[in-house]
Amino acid sequence: MTTATTGRTALRGVVGTAHTRVEGRDKVTGAARYAGEIPFADLAHGWLVLSTVTRGRIRSLDTEAVLALPGVLAVLHHGNAPRVDTEYVGLLGIPPDPTAAVFQHDRVPHAGWPVALVVAETPEQAREAAEALVVTYDEEPHRTVLTTGHPDAHPAGGVMPGETAKGDLAAGLAASAVVVDEEYTTPEEHHSMMEPHAATALWDGGRLEVVDSNQGTTWIQSELAQMFSLDASAVRVRSEHIGGGFGSKGLRAHQVAAVMAATELQRPVRVVMTRRQMFSLAGYRSPTLQHVRLGADADGRLRALEHRSLNQTSTVYEFVEPSAGVARVMYDAEAHHTANEVVPLDVPSPTFMRAPGEAPGSFAVESALDELAERCGIDPVELRLRNEPEVGPVSGLPFSSRNLDVCFREGARRFGWAERDPRPGRRREGRWLLGTGTAAASFHAGAGPSTAVVTAQADGGFTVRIAAADIGTGARTALTLVAADALEVAPDRVRVRIGDSDFGPAMIAGGSMGTRSWAWAIREAARELRERLALGTPIPPEGITVRSDTTEALGALAQKERHSFGAQFAEVAVDPATGEVRVRRMLGIFAAGRIVNPLTARNQLVGGMVWGISMALHEEAVRDRTSGALYAPDLAGYHVATNADVGDIQADWVDDPDPDDPVGIKGVGEIGVVGAAAAVANAVWHATGVRHRSLPIRPDRIL
Ligand code: MOS
């Protein structure tokens, strides 16, 4: 028996120090197993069959022919699948997307709708049979094109207010010396993360177990329990390693289909989405049509601001890409109107995709600000500094901290902004036109209730258990540092176990709130445990365990506007003959709370900025108007920025601890992408004198 004080050195202060990923070695050696590769005895394999029509009804499925094929065990479809419940409000306060509730009716609301699951002994047999399954449809005409003035467009419902309005917009614009009145558009974009969605379901002694790749095990546990009318304690969801989430890894067709098949066959069933299936089943970012009107005095101070955004959703579920929310935080004006509108079309349901709302919304607002700066003859950095609000423009609440001005000053200094000639099209270097641009970034900083369990072991080690999800962010490592810091021990004495719903309720990896929410809970339990150990209590063989629950503590966050902020800078080179755009360098300076692990935090910020380059120049999913389906729904047809597209890219931060968070964290998961596309587009204008209000800035569009 040892006591915890043995060998303990004063080690407070590991928060903020660089630490490589604690599971890094397992990941690069293949020891870390992902959901689709964990072995199970007697495993059967399901293959989803998706509709080949865009709207209509299933007339027939020729299951008999397929059941006769080698290894085929079952074909699930609307005629034989178990019924599930979708009439509930889920953990996030929203109802489930019925797209996940597979095989409940014969209607086809969009291209790539799941119509059947073929289950076989091997994945190859399942795939062969799925491709052989003949499904006939009664087709109906479809509408898949987002346009303004759509008769079914309506103000967005849901968690965020669809519209906000203060002051007289017409009067504000009329009294303005300078007005910008422009339309901006962004295309359909897909977050096709490295690891496709995969789940294995099995019944184990009366308990449903699902081994999955998701952004929150207790979230998926609760959704599956409600959908299948089970007690939550009868469902266990595990998700240890995740190859990317980005908002897409919630409840989806694969988990539900796997549970149905495992229930029918009474053996473990795995369902893995293919890359192409992800393009219709995994959610995506809606295209947006945005209208921004800015009115300002000659000195650039805003008098009037209007931001309206229209996005699409499916006919079965309303998901809103809340792009018009950006101006509610960023800029104030006496007349200030914002509106998110949505129109249902015969398309797959969009979903959360890294910085939902802020990413496309900041492209419109930050491009419009750049146009305003041009027309006022004011430097774009100076224009933003002049328009820094005192309090939340819509909420009227104080900011917990903002520091956007500090980011801009520091960024401008490091980028060499002062040397910039404001006139466009002036810098040349051989065949290249050079330009620089800037934009502001913001992202909501919140926290969700979580529970953590911390155990001091008799061998001197510590184990943390929390149903956190490390979707590639480095959360597991950050939480190790937070726990070590609170326990005042070296990080290598702490083992953080995550990704298991049996660890108790916890926030999801979402909204840039995961690490902060989990860190809060871990810190509470760890501090209490440390206090107990400081009394010299001997540790019994089973260890000493402390559990925390932050539900009440989070009240401290109310009554303030909480956001991370940032200043983005980009330099581009444009070849006017070929239309080629090269992002030579990018710098982002962020005020994003206390940084727990500079290594992985920088990864997050740089990763987001790369998404911004990708959004500015490459990403665009194109829907065929005749078929209603996507052209080339894979990573050959859908272009994303690769190494060769990214020049010198740097992210750094200013000191900005959240005053009400025990660790000072805000969150870094999403802000890197915000404003990044606008900074690139503004740099392209500066290089060429041509404004790009529609993304992506393809070579054929450049001049
Ligand atoms: Mo993020 S889009 O909240 O996973």
Image (tube, helix red, strand yellow):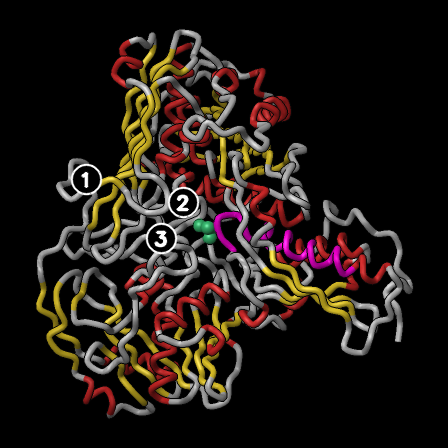
Q: Are marks 3 and 2 in contact (CB under 8 Å)?
A: yes
Q: Residues within 10 Å of mark 1 (few under 14, many from 20)?
A: some
Quarter of the figure that contains the N terminus: bottom right
Q: Which amino acid type is marked by label 2? A: Pro
Q: Work out whether 221 lies above or below 95.
A: below
Residue 236 circle label = none
Label 3 to label 2, Cα distance in Å?
Answer: 8 Å
Q: Work out whether 136 lies above or below 331.
A: below
At horizontal 70% and vertical 59% (from top left) the residue drawn is 525
Residue nearer the viewer, 90 or 172: 90
Residue 356 circle label = 2
Camera-side mark, 1 or 2: 2
The answer to whether residue 326 is seen in the rendering is: yes
Q: Is residue 587 left or right of residue 266?
A: right
Q: Are marks 1 and 2 in contact (CB under 8 Å)?
A: no
Q: Is residue 606 left or right of residue 137?
A: right
Q: Work out whether 77 lies above or below 153.
A: below
Q: Residues within 10 Å of mark 3 (few under 14, many from 20)?
A: many
- Magenta stretch: dominant SS? helix
Label 1 to label 2, Cα distance in Å?
Answer: 20 Å
Residue 147 circle label = 1
Point out residue 102 in the picture as x, y percentages from the top left corner: 28, 71
